[in-house]
Image (cartoon, coloured by chain):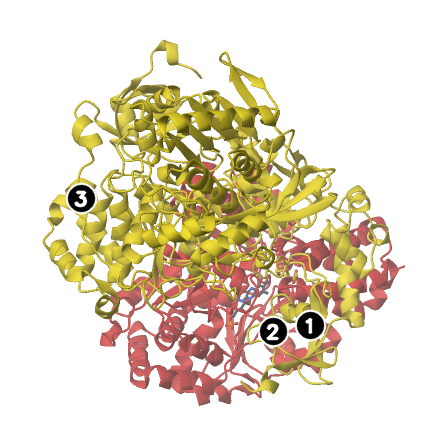
């Protein structure tokens, strides 16, 4: 475009602008962020135009008449003359703020720090103090009551200036629509729900409103101290695979509050309540502060030296007596890449076995495996930003508004605005409610369901023939088998009508760009890996790979589940996914580790327990994973641990697993260490230490290095940057990653030597060459074939927004006030059939055991299907889950448990 | 903010309408109960705060409205005519105090004394027979003089038959979308809703915006106290309005038309409903109209008592069931309007001119009027005139001729005319001679033609009280979104009230600052337009008002 067409005059000076840019945007770029005062504008909200303090004078000709325009929502007119500080504008701004101050608490104005109270800042900028107000006292809202009932959220609406930022944040960012104005005009009052206050409303405590409020009228229990903190450190959230960036404020070495940086590429100023508010666990009284050694069945506080001596001694004697394969390690996806790398290195190079696995086993191992088999890389093909470009979203077996809330909120935003949404889930999740197509299948029938979709795409002739021919292999066989499916039988077993399936298939296949997301509802099944490969099939046969707005995007569970696998926490692959049975890979690892390495594939987690029970495994070191509470079939896990000679558990809290340990080592939380986490879109981000480890706790990487050295391995002293450098020499896709160059938003792997980040993979060709299209037939899980007669109902497990996994952290924060217990979701019909009322305790029995749990009657689940969470040790839902596993990756089948139910008898009728 | 809600509301289409359901839910008790609002939120996939907040906005939906059985008009004209107190008093013998509510302007300004009972409006001396009306609806015998000095009236002539409209629409089909648009552009017709925006440009912009679904919205929220011209057209010439929408839809490629009719005009709703049925029977609504392949269906949405819903973006939000808060522009409705789809919003009177333009041609229309103000204009004359009622005049006639000729002058002494609604200018009687009735003349003289409702301010009515009333009107009707209007109108009202009642003198500098802030700072003309009349009064009634200033 001609340059002069895109130029305007700002206070007489000619500058260039971008088409469509607002005046405010341009002025902030040209004159600085503070040049134009605003009150209703916020970085993550759409222009709204209520405060009018952003107004500027605009003329269409050099000496033409000037018109006042609100800069925040007026696009730049080419060739116009913008004046930011005419007398009229200065007067206008001041006079508006004066009006605002006629209804603002004098005390608050006087006391608040102008850096945190935008109204005060703008008042001072525009040259007015509250004592300058000329109006006589009149109608006001200074006597509004405060709302202090919620564990986190606070409202003091006497200080509200009706800028709508909170309301817009709740709608435009979180999508919850909890807030509204009530009334009209001057009487407008911000209101939660139907005038219920935060606590009783549907607020999910994301804090977006609190962060948006310019006056502290809506705030949270931490905000005041945040405002006066000594220091703010940017780091990455420890909770889920979204990988939100956080600004953590500290005063005198204590964390006082967290908010979200607006310039974070991952989360743009948003987080969920776990990231923003659930940090108080870190110095909870129950936090482990010293190494503990079990002596005569009781834990005793010991020094690090004593603990280390004990562990090293035991490892060495067990290895001498039973060989290295009698030892195993479980590493943690909660820990950094550097720590995971070290743990697998310790097990392989120091102990000399491949018995290393991680908690990814129980969640996304089928994703890693299935996507590797299909594409060659076990990671998301695209990025979350692709939601902006997509024309159709398919969510399979995931409830991201609870488990990946920031991504969930983004999907919700897209769906509300009309991007077609397909949800495949047995539960009527919040996204399912919004979906155009909700395929509410019976748990355990994913493969049948996806085959239906594949069938309808192929029979409608909607496959992308060109993509299939050029980029894939195996299609012809596959199509043959798909076409010969008994589609009526598929509809029968899934319980999803053929017509609905057909419509959804056509919506996905005919969208110019369609992207899928999947979660544990896909992987935690006996056919989990196959299902992942079918999702890949869907993308490949429709050509939805290698562009913006497409792809296969697993919603990785824990914050660093991607990273732990990348770092080699798997029994069959080392750091960088090289096959440990491949001589070339062995040579490479041996060169770097400087020792000979074991050549056989080690045990996966469930196999470790089997081996222990069989007397073959004698020692285990578990980092940050509560296998007792979170792994299926609790009784069996306990038995396995009991059988071992040495159980080392490195933890933040005395979990159910730690209770069974011989040695408990106090690790450090994410706030207390530096390193990197890799989020679900392959983004390696810097975790920066905010505070020192509490008590005598130590950084986990340090602990591993200490033990390595004591076992005679020459590992350099621990620093995150040093280990990352070691990793970048071994892991091909980390080649260009350097600690100093990661910046605030990290880099997405593969990162080539030149340091370039990659937001999309398989663009030209698949990592494995041609994409592998493969057919899989549905098979009923053994859990059903074996037990359905005696146990006619199916329970599937899920997660709640407020809690994380075993809840060790979130249960030790204010979150517990929001959600105190696991509940059983049960359809009204099943409840009626079994004489169960809402709130009754229900005894749920499976072939393994029984638990008592409170019923919540809801139409979120179909008759015959129930759902529950597993966050609370009081319930130990995993007493009943099965030990059926994915045939390929050995991920446990948490999602299908055959049970029977009855109302609990007196002894269990807890309230 | 509006985007999500617009889309969610739009998912259900026009036929399952959130706002309509809220209004229906208020019918029994005067306000929808919380359970209904909760269910609606669930159905429309919104937070329950949304429906709760929306209902709280409207006079006839908010919880305070519960139990109101009869409504007295508190519009400017009835106020100045001084009929409100006696009506209220007389109703008081039949109703408890808490059963008597208010409505702002029932469009009976030509005789005042207006009230609404059982979905029926009454005025003049109807109050004497109120006992009868309570038990039995009775006849609505209010009539007003309709005057036109034109040989071929554009808007007020004898209503055409439905057959005539059918053949007129054949003419549209023959001309095609481009041909019909060319006529409208040639007519140079400007919007009659107040802003005077060229209709041809608006239709063309919508036509050129690609979209699967588009809408034509008729703004029949005629909120200006003193104006009843839209009411006249809706009730006496409904087919002309519907034909205008049909034609606009044909040109722009819209298949749905919405008439947003204010709740204060129940008779209009009834008449238009019948007219739509008649159109349908004649094959002028529905699929494949007259074999043209063009589909069009009408929908009536009844308002619920909020002046700001006349502002086009607030009106769209209202239809969607959102709080009718004024939206920023761009995006303009022709790009992203109802349910985020391209939409044309036109005033009743603008649309009603289309039959003439199609029949006689754009040029014939443009032959009426002056320069930039082509065509004719309806003017509403209040009960101070010797000949009150509805007048159609050619744009550009001397204002004097209208007031003293057609209107016959005043029954009792009048000192000023408030022309163009509460946001219009206050014309002192001595300025009448300087004006001609068109957009330009009024603007040049510092007034506003607007919708051309004329409210007379009697000689003995204190101007300070009238100014208080104007600030009060804006304070009560402000949507509350922008700071200058929502806070400023309240402070202005307080200043006027303190001056009128407690002899607290006004700081002129402060008042000037306030007026400037509202005028240049407000997001829409509710806050932005108020200062015009106030400034007129300050200028022309300085002598009367100076006692109130420091
Ligand atoms: C506060 C306010 C109230 C309005 N009320 C009405 C109204 O009652 N009727 C109307 O047609 N236009 C009204 N308008 C103007 C509309 O916003 C819009 O300009 C008009 O409907 C466009 O139609 P037209 O171009 O045919 O005039 C109002 C504007 C404002 C700012
Ligand atoms: S905390 Fe989040 S969900 Fe709750 S009201 Fe605020 S923005 Fe809405
Ligand atoms: S509570 Fe805060 S963000 Fe919300 S409207 Fe009031 S001042 Fe604005
Ligand atoms: S001027 Fe008044 S009515 Fe218009 S947007 Fe502002 S507050 Fe709302
Ligand atoms: S920032 Fe533009 S109106 Fe508030």
Task: Determine which residue is flagged by label 1.
Answer: A30
Which residue is identified by label 2? B407
* Parent chain of label 3: A
Q: Nearer the viewer, residue B312 or A631?
A: A631
Q: Residues within 10 Å of mark 3 (few under 14, many from 20)?
A: some
Number of numbered discs on residues: 3
Q: Which numbered disc, 1 or 2, marks the residue closer to the eye?
A: 1
Closer to the eye: label 1 or 3: 3
Please state, as top left, top right, bottom left or bottom right, where the C terminus of chain A lies in the image. Answer: top left
Asked whether the viewer can see residue A722, the reply is: yes
Q: Chain of mark 2?
A: B
Residue in the image at 77% along x and 52% along y:
A120
Q: Where residue A670 sits in the image (x, y, percent)?
A: 57, 40
CB contact under 8 Å: marks 1 and 3: no
Q: In terms of image quadrants, where is residue A895?
A: top left
Q: Secondary structure at mark 1?
A: helix
| Residue nearer the viewer, B107 or B504 | B504
- Local packing at callout 2 (Cα closer than 10 Å; few below 14, some 14-19, many 20+) is many
What colour do you see for chain B? Answer: red
For this orientation, the residue located farthest to the right is: B550
How far from the left and from the top, in percent, is residue B479?
Answer: 60, 55
10 Å neighbourhood of mark 1: few (<14), some, or many (≥20)? some
Residues at marks 1 and 3, common chain?
yes
Q: Which mark is residue A778?
A: 3
Q: Secondary structure at mark 3?
A: loop
Q: Are marks 3 and 2 in contact (CB under 8 Å)?
A: no
> Within 8 Å: ligand 2 and the Cβ of disc 3?
no
Q: Which of the 4 image quadrants contains residue B362?
A: bottom left
What residue appears at the point 23 percent right and 66 percent down from the top-left corner? A468
In the picture, which chain is yellow? A
Q: Is residue A202 left or right of residue A366?
A: right
């Amino acid at each position: 475009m001609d340059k002069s067409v895109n130029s305007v005059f700002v206070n007489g000076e000619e500058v260039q602008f971008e088409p469509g840019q607002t005046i405010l945007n341009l002025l902030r770029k040209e004159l600085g962020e503070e040049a134009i005062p605003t009150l209703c504008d916020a970085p993550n909200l759409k222009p709204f135009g209520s405060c009018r303090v952003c107004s500027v004078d605009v003329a269409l000709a050099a000496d033409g008449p000037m018109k006042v325009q609100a800069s925040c929502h007026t696009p730049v007119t080419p060739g116009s003359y913008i004046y930011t500080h005419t007398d009229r504008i200065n007067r206008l701004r001041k006079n508006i703020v004066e009006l605002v101050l006629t209804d603002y608490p004098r005390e608050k104005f006087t006391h608040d720090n102008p850096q945190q109270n935008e109204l005060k800042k703008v008042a001072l900028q525009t040259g007015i103090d509250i004592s300058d107000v000329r109006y006589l006292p009149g109608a006001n809202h200074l006597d509004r009551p405060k709302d202090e009932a919620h564990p986190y959220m606070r409202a003091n609406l006497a200080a509200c200036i009706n800028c709508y930022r909170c309301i817009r944040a709740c709608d435009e960012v979180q999508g919850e629509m909890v807030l509204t104005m009530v009334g009209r005009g001057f009487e407008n009052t911000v209101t939660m729900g139907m005038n219920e206050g935060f606590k009783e409303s549907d607020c999910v405590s994301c804090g977006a409103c609190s962060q948006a409020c310019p006056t502290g009228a809506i705030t949270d229990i931490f905000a005041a101290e945040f405002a006066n903190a000594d220091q703010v450190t940017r780091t990455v959230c420890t909770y889920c695979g979204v990988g939100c960036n956080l600004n953590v404020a500290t005063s005198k070495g204590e964390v006082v509050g967290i908010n979200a940086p607006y310039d974070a590429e991952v989360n743009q100023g948003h987080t969920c309540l776990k990231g923003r508010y659930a940090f108080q666990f870190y110095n909870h009284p129950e936090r482990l502060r010293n190494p503990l050694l079990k002596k005569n069945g009781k834990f005793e506080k010991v020094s690090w030296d004593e603990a280390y001596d004990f562990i090293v001694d035991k490892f060495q004697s067990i290895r001498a007596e039973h060989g290295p394969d009698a030892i195993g390690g479980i590493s943690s996806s909660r820990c950094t890449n550097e720590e995971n790398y070290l743990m697998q290195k310790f097990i392989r190079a120091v102990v000399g076995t491949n018995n290393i696995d991680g908690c990814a086993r129980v969640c996304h191992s089928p994703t890693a495996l299935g996507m590797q088999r299909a594409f060659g890389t076990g990671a998301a093909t695209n990025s979350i930003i692709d939601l902006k470009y997509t024309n159709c979203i398919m969510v399979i077996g995931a409830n991201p508004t609870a488990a990946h809330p920031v991504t969930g909120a983004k999907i919700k935003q897209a769906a509300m605005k009309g991007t077609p949404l397909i949800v495949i889930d047995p539960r009527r999740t919040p996204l399912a409610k919004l979906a155009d197509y909700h395929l509410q299948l019976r748990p355990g029938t994913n493969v049948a369901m996806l085959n239906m979709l594949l069938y309808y795409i192929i029979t409608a002739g909607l496959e992308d023939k060109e993509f299939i021919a050029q980029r894939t292999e195996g299609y012809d066989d596959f199509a043959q088998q798909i076409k010969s499916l008994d589609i009526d039988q598929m509809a029968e077993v899934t319980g999803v009508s053929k017509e609905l399936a057909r419509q959804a298939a056509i919506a996905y296949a005919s969208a110019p760009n369609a992207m899928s997301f999947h979660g544990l509802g896909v992987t935690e099944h006996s056919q989990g890996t196959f299902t992942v490969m079918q999702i890949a099939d869907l993308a490949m046969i429709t050509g939805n790979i290698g562009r913006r707005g497409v792809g296969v995007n697993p919603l990785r569970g824990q914050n660093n589940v991607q990273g732990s696998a990348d770092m080699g926490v798997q029994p069959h692959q080392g750091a960088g996914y090289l096959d440990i049975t491949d001589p070339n890979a062995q040579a490479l690892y041996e060169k770097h580790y400087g020792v000979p390495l074991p050549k056989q594939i080690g045990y996966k987690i469930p196999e470790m327990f089997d081996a222990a029970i069989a007397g073959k495994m004698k020692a285990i070191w578990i980092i940050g994973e509560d296998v007792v509470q979170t792994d299926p079939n609790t009784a069996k896990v306990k038995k396995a641990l009991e059988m071992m000679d040495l159980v080392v558990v490195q933890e933040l809290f005395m979990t159910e697993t730690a209770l069974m340990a011989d040695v408990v080592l106090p690790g450090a939380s994410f706030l207390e260490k530096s390193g990197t986490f890799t989020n679900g879109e392959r983004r390696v981000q810097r975790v920066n230490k905010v505070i020192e480890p509490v008590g005598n706790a130590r950084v986990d990487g340090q602990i591993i290095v200490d033990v390595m050295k004591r076992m005679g391995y020459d590992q350099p002293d621990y620093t995150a940057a040093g280990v990352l450098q070691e990793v970048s020499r071994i892991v091909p896709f980390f080649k260009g990653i350097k600690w100093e160059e990661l910046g605030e938003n990290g880099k997405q792997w593969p990162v080539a030597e030149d340091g370039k980040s990659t937001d999309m993979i398989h663009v030209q060709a698949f990592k494995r060459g041609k994409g592998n299209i493969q057919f899989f037939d549905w098979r009923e899980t053994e859990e059903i074939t074996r037990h359905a007669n005696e146990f006619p109902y199916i329970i599937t497990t899920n997660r709640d927004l407020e809690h994380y996994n075993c809840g060790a952290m979130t249960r030790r924060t204010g979150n517990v006030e929001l959600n105190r217990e696991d509940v059983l979701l049960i359809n009204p019909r099943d409840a009626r059939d079994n004489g169960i009322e809402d709130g009754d305790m229900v005894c749920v029995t499976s072939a393994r055991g029984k638990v008592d749990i409170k019923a919540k009657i809801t139409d979120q689940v179909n008759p015959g299907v129930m759902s529950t969470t597993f966050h609370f040790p009081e319930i130990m839902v995993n007493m009943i889950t099965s030990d059926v596993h994915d045939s390929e990756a050995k991920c446990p089948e948490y999602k299908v448990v055959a049970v029977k139910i009855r109302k609990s008898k007196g002894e269990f009728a807890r309230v | 903010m509006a985007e999500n809600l617009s889309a969610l509301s739009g998912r259900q289409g026009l036929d399952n309408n959130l706002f309509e359901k809220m209004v229906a839910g208020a019918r029994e008790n005067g306000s929808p109960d919380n359970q209904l609002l909760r269910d609606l939120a669930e159905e429309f996939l919104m937070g329950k705060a949304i429906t709760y907040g929306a209902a709280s906005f409207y006079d006839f939906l908010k919880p305070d409205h519960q139990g109101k059985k009869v409504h007295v008009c508190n519009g400017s004209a009835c106020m100045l005519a001084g009929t409100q107190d006696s009506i209220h008093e007389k109703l008081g013998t039949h109703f408890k105090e808490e059963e008597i509510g208010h409505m702002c302007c029932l469009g009976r300004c030509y005789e005042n004394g207006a009230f609404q009972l059982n979905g029926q409006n009454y005025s003049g001396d109807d109050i004497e027979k109120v006992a009868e009306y309570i038990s039995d609806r009775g006849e609505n015998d209010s009539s007003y003089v309709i005057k036109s000095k034109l040989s071929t009236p554009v808007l007020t002539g004898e209503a055409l038959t439905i057959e005539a409209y059918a053949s007129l629409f054949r003419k549209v089909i023959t001309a095609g979308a481009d041909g019909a648009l060319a006529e409208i552009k040639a007519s140079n017709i400007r919007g009659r809703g107040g802003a005077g925006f060229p209709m041809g440009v608006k239709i063309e912009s919508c036509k050129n915006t690609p979209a699967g679904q588009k809408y034509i919205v008729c703004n029949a929220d005629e909120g200006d106290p003193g104006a009843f011209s839209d009411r006249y057209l809706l009730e006496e010439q409904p087919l002309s309005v519907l034909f205008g929408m049909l034609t606009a839809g044909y040109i722009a490629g819209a298949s749905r038309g919405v008439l947003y009719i204010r709740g204060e005009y129940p008779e209009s709703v009834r008449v238009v409903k019948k007219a739509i049925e008649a159109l349908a029977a004649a094959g002028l609504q529905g699929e494949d109209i007259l074999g043209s392949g063009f589909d069009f269906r009408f929908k009536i949405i009844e308002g619920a008592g909020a002046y700001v819903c006349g502002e086009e973006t607030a009106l769209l939000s209202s239809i969607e069931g959102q709080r009718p808060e004024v939206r920023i522009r761009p995006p303009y409705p022709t790009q992203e309007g109802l349910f985020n789809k391209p939409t044309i919003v036109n005033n009743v009177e603008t649309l009603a001119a289309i039959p003439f333009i199609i029949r006689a041609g754009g040029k014939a229309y443009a032959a009426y009027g002056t320069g930039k103000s082509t065509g004719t204009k309806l003017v509403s004359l209040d009960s101070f005139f010797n000949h009150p009622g509805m007048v159609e005049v050619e744009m550009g006639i001397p204002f004097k001729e209208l007031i003293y000729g057609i209107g016959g002058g005043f029954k009792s002494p009048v000192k000023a005319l408030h022309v163009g609604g509460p946001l219009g200018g206050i014309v002192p009687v001595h300025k009448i001679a300087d004006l001609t009735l068109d957009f330009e003349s009024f603007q040049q003289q510092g007034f506003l033609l607007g919708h051309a409702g004329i409210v007379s301010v009697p000689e003995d009515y204190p101007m300070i009280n009238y100014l208080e009333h104007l600030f009060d009107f804006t304070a009560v009707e402000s949507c509350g979104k922008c700071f200058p209007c929502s806070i400023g109108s309240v402070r202005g009202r307080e200043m006027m009230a303190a001056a009128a009642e407690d002899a607290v003198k006004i700081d002129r500098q402060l008042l000037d600052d306030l007026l400037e802030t509202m005028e240049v700072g407000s997001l829409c003309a509710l806050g932005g337009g108020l200062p015009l009349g106030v400034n007129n009064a300050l200028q022309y009634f300085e002598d009367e008002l100076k006692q109130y200033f420091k």
